[in-house]
Every structure is written in structure tokens, then in C-alpha cells.
Amino acid sequence: MSTNNESFLTKYIFSTDHKVIGKQFIWLGIFFLFFGGYLSLLMRWQLAYPEQAVPWWLSWGIFFKDAGGIIDPDTYNQLFTMHGTIMIFWAVTPILIGGFGNFVIPLQIGAPDMAFPRLNMISFWTWFLSSVVLLASYLLPQGPAAAGWTSYPPLSSPMGGIPGEGQTLWTLALVLMGTGTIMGAINYIITVVRLRAPGMTYFRMPLTVWGLWLTSIMNAVFVPVIAAGLILLLLDRVLGTEFFVAGGLASGPGGDPLLYQHVFWIFGHPEVYILILPVWGIVSDLLAVFARKPAFGYKVTAICMSTICVLSSIVWGHHMYTTGMSPLLGKAFMFLTLLISIPSSIFFLNWLATLWKGNLHFEPPMIYTMGVVWVFAIGGLTGLYNATVTSDIYLHDTMFVVGHFHFTLAATLVLGLFAAIHYWFPKMFGREINRTMANIHFWVTFVSMNFVFFNMMVLGYAGHHRRLYNPMEFDFLKPLLGLNEWITWFAIINGVIQLLFIFNFVWSMFKGKVAVRNPWGASTLEWTLDAPLPHGNFAQTPTVYSRPHEYSHPSLTDTDWVPQSEPIPGTA
Amino acid sequence: MERQSKLSSIPRVDSFTSHLGLVVMLGGMAMFFITLFVSQSILENRFGVSYMPGGGSTFLFHSSMNTMVLIVASLFLEMGWQKLRKDDSSSAILYQGSTLFASVVFLISQVGLWNRMISAGFLPSTDLMGAFFYAFTGLHGLHIVGAVGTLGWLFWKMHTIEESELLIRWTVNARMFVHFLTVVWLFIFVRLFVMV
Ligand SMILES: [Cu+2]
């Protein structure tokens, strides 16, 4: 089954093997995770010590030299713009969707590879090209994009006040990235639909696959929408059209900047579910593995996730309550948004019920997973205040929103991807990841991120706006300086401890204990294979007999699990 | 055959899977163009319809000819497909080549139309009509460039590859793609030239 005479280039660089492509995505994502994280620390420095020189250990003695080490307002705008853009599209998306989507989907459904392996390779390299375009904007004399990760016009249009071509490259990079995303989405959707092993019905798929599959469907539907919007924005910048320019800035009748906001959020709200669905799936599976119980309400969880996908496409207006939309429309969007809390609460209670009276094993993947349960609860509950028109009018564009979406997106996704990395590490590299280092990394990360994001919400409640260069220019924000300092130091601790993670990752790759075939006693198909996995995966296509988490089944005697590819004794 | 064997460790998917993949892709493209159409309608609604130079009629003939060329390309492709199904591969190649030729003619004529528009002082920056005219025709044209590439590749494959199953699969895919672009063009034509 293994490949014959593959050169280094076809095996590691232009590989068509989904496992290699998955790892390429993970490496790319980890690079950007650190890059984007570093940008956030610089931003935090400015908020805690406004207009004071960045210390040498943070600026590495090379950045901000001409301004005497001070972050100027333009640079600050670039920091939050690129932090958001990079973390969402170049860090979390590649790791969770590109990386684990590639690595896990074919293995868990018993497929030899993705349906279209060459398209898969092209998808990664399109992504890589988009990264180069994005990073190239740092070489421009006026630096990268600076209109926020949402890049609303007119701020992002040439007459809107952001100088330089950074914004143009940003838009181009996003269009390229979107193209790569759609290629991946086509592959994932078709792979799940067509390449499931015999017996692997939809309701026998692991919830990880469910999450990634739904994510891909949403990507295929909604990424083209933002691509169209971004191309119109690009034409505004390059050809002098005025799709999104209005009023005095326009030379003629002009267009409508609000149209961009609609197009952006028609994609943008589904995007948050695109990002979080894989984590919901991973958490649902991992809780069952480490509680040694079937996932409570397996089918209901899958249906709830699907329901959320449908609902998420008709709630985008909750980002636009303050744009002067009709109160009736605002109410409709509020109602629809709050509806989402029903399926969300149902599967969240399913998670808790999976844990209930379980035989909990606090292995590294499990502690990260439990972390997700906590931060997602906080993130979800604080979302209600943003979904409600009356409270959102006060909270809109404050640090409360920043804290809220960092609980849902940053904390949930980052802990989720750490859970995934620690869980599949033995299968990816054939070695165990070091447990002590993982534990230390988890607790420091978990405590510091909670402190940071929770207190951001406190700041917001006190009226602290987001994207504010120097809060000390406002008297009513001066009492918040101390809290800003605390947040910054906890953010720095959070940043520093990630070095332990990367050390553990690389160290364990080479020096970790050699892993057994199935260290977690998990019953999904990938654990029936020995690492290193050959190109083509299964020597014989497996046949699936049961749901993905039949742990502690009463008819099992010696062990508490059997792989999905073996019938549970006494059932059949 | 040499090139196929390099990927031998991965089983090749069946034709239905391949077509299904293309359907998902075309679904995405449909969302893309729908976003553009809806954006145009919204802005037109707010700011009123602006007109092309000469009320559009000056360029209506040219654009109608382009539409005809694209429809003919689709027809040729369909006829080639019928021939291929009857195993008449030499006629199929002829029709496939004609499709390719018609698509190239469409692109050249489209560039000609842009030239005339630009010399008439009708630019992307002129007004919303201009902006949408160039956005639609440009983005559709880019997809036609993709179609020309696909058809050229298919034309070459028809001469070099023996395996009729693969040939039929690729022809079906090319057929879906080209017909899809023709339909999108009909919408664009109606929206830009007929409904003004
Ligand atoms: Cu939203």
C-alpha cells in the first residue's frame, strides 16, 4: 500500500496525501498563531502603558525604532487589524479546518484519502500564496491594512483615510484565502458524502466529522458571498468604482457603505459557526472518550449542530443594530438570534450529561476539552447581551464585545485546537506528547485567558470602547488604567507559556515516548491503524458496526471499548 | 497512462463523485454571482438606474452578438457530447474544437466591447452602471478564461487519452461548467442591457 519511489518534493512539499497536507496546514497555522498572538501583546502594551516606549524584550530591539519605541496610532490600527485577520483566517482556520479536517475526516470515515487529492494540494498552496501576499503587505512603506478585521468602507476605501496599498493586498489575500477555503470545502463535503466506509452511516459518523462536514457546507455557501463583496471593495480601491462610497466622499451619486456591512455579515456570522463547529464536534467526541460513556444524545447533538447552521444564516443583522435599521427588523434579528440559544443549550446539556457519572480520565486532551466547556459557557451566555437590541446599543463596539467573542472564538477555539493536537498527536507523530508540560501549559493558559477576556468585558461594561488608541485621553476611562495593566500582564503570561507548548510539541515529536496504537482506548477508526500511517490509510476498507462512542457497553467484559470496525459481542 | 499510475496509491473516485464535486463548486459560484446581482438591485433601488452612453442601444447589438456566440458555444458542446455518447469520437473532437473556438471568439469580442466602451468615455468609475458593467463582464470573463483553459485541456486529452470513461467524465464536467457560465451570462445580459 505504501508509496513507491516518491521524491522528497512529492512526499513532503507537493504531497497529495491528506495526512501530509493536514500537517502542512497545522505548521502554517502555528506560525500565524504566534505571529498574531505577538501582535496582540503589542496592542496590550499600548493600552496599559499608552504612548510609552515598548520595552526591549517585547520589541526585540528592532521594532518601532524611529518613533522612539512608541507605537503610533497608525501602527496601532495595523496591529488590531492584522491580529484579528491573522488569528481568524490564517491561524485558527488552517489548524482546525485545514489541519484536522484533512487529517481526521478520511481516517474517521474509513476512506483512503480525500475525494480529490490534487485539489487538496492546490488548496494548501493557494492558502500559502495568500499568506505570502498578506505578509508582503508588511514590506510596503505605509505598512499593512489598518481598517479592522471587518474592513468597513469608507475606512477601507481609498478616500476613507487609510493610506497605502496594505488594504489592497489585504483584500487580495482574503480573496485568495477564500478560494483555497472553497477548494477544501468541496473536498470535505464530497469525501463525507461519497467515501464513507461500508456501515458508516451519517448517524455513525464521529461528531468531529459532523462538525467539519457542516463547517464545509457553510464554507461552500458563504465564502463566495464575502468573495463577491471583497472583489467589489477591491474594485473600489483599484479601478475607482464607488460601490461602497457615499456622500461627500463620492464623486457622483456613489454607492452604499452599509451594503458592504450586510454582505460582510451574511458571511461573517456563519463564519463564527464555521470556526466553532469543528470544536463542538471534537469536544462532543472527546468528552465521551474520556468519560468512557457514549456521548449523551449523540443524534440530538448532530441535529442541533445542523439546526444552528440553518439559523446562523439568517441572523447577521445583530451586528448592525446601531446602523439605524428599522426597529422591526432589529427585533426580528434579535428573535432569530436568541432562537439559536435553544439548540446550543441542548447540545451543551448533552455535554454535561455525557460527563454525568462518567469515569473521567483527566488526560491532557481531556483537560483542554473541559476548559472548552467552561469558556464556551461564558462566551455563549454573554452573547445574549449582544443579541438583545436594548443592551447591545450600549455595549456595541465596546470591549465587552471583544471579551465576548474572545471567549467564544479565541478561548474556545484555541483550547479546542490544543485538545485536538494533544489527542491526535500520537497518531500524527507516533509519539506521546509530554504530560507534565501539557498540564502546566493548560493551567497557565486557562487561568490567564479567563482573566484577560473576563476583564475585557468589565472594561466594556464601564464604557471602554474597542479599537481605542489611548484610553487615557478620556477622563472617565482613567480609573480603568490599573485593570488595563493587569490584563496586559496576564496576556503576557499567556503569551510566554505558549513557548512551553511549542517546546513540548517539537520535543515530543523527536524525544517523546513511543505511543501505542490506541493510547486513549478510543473506538473511532483512526485508532485501528499503526503510526506512521501509509499513503492510502487502510490496508483493507473497514466495515463499521456501531456508533462512534459505545464505551462501557454492558456486553463488553475484558475492555470497555471495541473499535467501530468490530461488532460489539452479543449485539449484531 | 504514465501520469495516472503515479497516483496509483490513491484509488480514483468514480464519475458520479467527480460530477458531484463540480456541482458543489457551481453552487458556490452561483452564490457569488447572486451576491453581485442582489447588490446591484439594492443599489439601483436606492440611487435609480443610470444609463449607458446612448441609452445602451449603441452597444446592444455588439452585446447581443456576444450572447449569441456563447449560446452557440454551449450548443456545439452539447452536440459534441451527443456524438461522444454514440462513440463517434472524430465528430466529437470537431464539435469540442468549435466550442473552444467560439469561447475564444466571445472573449475577443468582449475585449472589443470594453474598448468601444472606454473610448466612449464609459469607465468603471463613471457611475454605478459602469461599475457593475465592468464588474460583471470582467468576473464572468475571468470564468470564461477558466472555461477556455478547461476546454483546451480537454481538446488535447481527446487526442491523447484512450480511456473513454475518463473522457466522458471530463466532457460531462466541462459541459456543466460551460452551460452554467452561459446561463450566468444570460442573466448578466438581461440585467445590463435589457432591463435598463
Ligand atoms: Cu453574529
Image: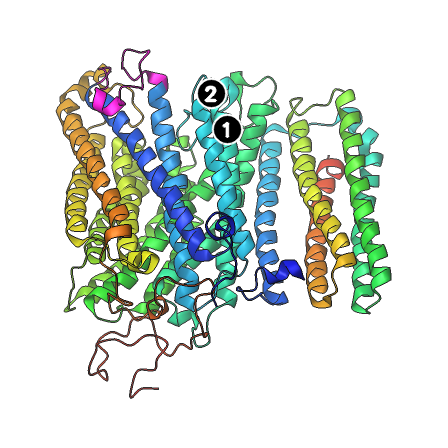
| Residue behind mark 2 | A140
**Which chain does the numbered disc 2 sit on?**
A
Bounds of the magenta segment: A50-74
**Which chain does the numbered disc 1 sit on?**
A
Q: Is residue A494 left or right of residue A159?
A: left
Say how many tags the image has. 2
| Residue behind mark 1 | A169
x and y percent of residue A362 in the render? 16, 60
x and y percent of residue B165 in the render? 70, 67
One can see residue A353 in this view: no
Viewport quadrant of the C terminus of chain A:
bottom left
- Which residue sits at x=63%, y=61%? B4
The residue sitting at the bottom extreme is A570
* Residue type (three-letter) at the residue carrying disc 2: Leu
Secondary structure type for disc 1: helix
One can see residue B148 in this view: yes
The reply to whether dot 2 and dot 1 touch (C-beta < 8 Å) is yes
* Residue type (three-letter) at the residue carrying disc 1: Leu
Q: In this view, does A417 lie to the left or right of B174?
A: left
Q: Which quadrant of the structure image shows residue A410?
A: top left
Does residue A394 lie above or below B143 as drawn? above
x and y percent of residue B181 in the render? 70, 48
Does residue A290 lie above or below B177 as drawn? below
Does residue A107 lie above or below B64 as drawn? below
Q: Which colour scheme is used?
A: rainbow
Examine the structure image and report whether residue A59 is included in the region drawn in magenta. yes
What secondary structure predominates along the stretch shown in magenta? loop
Closest to the camera, between mark 2 and mark 1, is 2
Q: In this view, does B131 lie to the left or right of A465?
A: right
Examine the structure image and report whether residue A116 is included in the region drawn in magenta. no
